[in-house]
Amino acid sequence: MLKSCLSCAQDGAACCIVASEDFVRAHKLENQAIEFVAQALDTDDPTTFDSESAMELVGCSMTK
């Protein structure tokens, strides 16, 4: 997997191959490896639950 092939979180497509550092070194993949230190996704804000709309409950406002 190349860095240029990584997908943005918002388009719905992604791939992640998890490998140990030992595997990466053994197969000489250091120049292609990407280390994820942290990731976060925040989707539910108060409007999701304050509204009586079923559309809001399933996250319609997140798409705008």
Image (cartoon, rainbow, N blue to C red):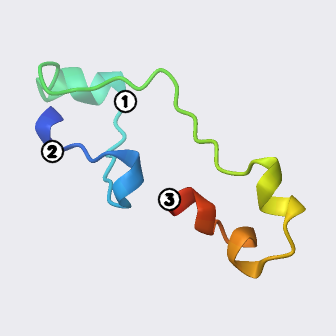
* Residue at 75% across, 48% down: 45
Q: Which residue is mark 1?
A: 20
On the image, the x and y values in percent for residue 4 come to 12, 37
Q: Position of residue 64 (x, y in %)?
A: 50, 59
* Amino acid type for the residue under numbered disc 2: Cys
Secondary structure under tag 2 reads: helix
- Is residue 2 at least partly visible in the picture? no
Q: CA distance from mark 3 to mark 2?
A: 26 Å
Q: Secondary structure at mark 3?
A: loop
> Which residue occupies 38% across, 61% down?
12
Name above or below for residue 54 compared with residue 1: below
**In the depicted view, which residue is nearer to us: 23 or 40?**
40
Q: In the rendered structure, find residue 64 and report the number of the disc placed on it.
A: 3
Q: Toward which corner of the image does residue 2 lie, by quadrant?
A: top left
The reply to whether dot 1 and dot 3 touch (C-beta < 8 Å) is no
Crowd class of label 2 (few under 14; some 14 to 19; many from 20; radius 10 Å): few
The location of residue 44, given as percent across then percent down, is: 72, 51
Q: Indicate the position of residue 11 as horizontal and vertical percent values.
A: 34, 57
Marking on residue 5: 2
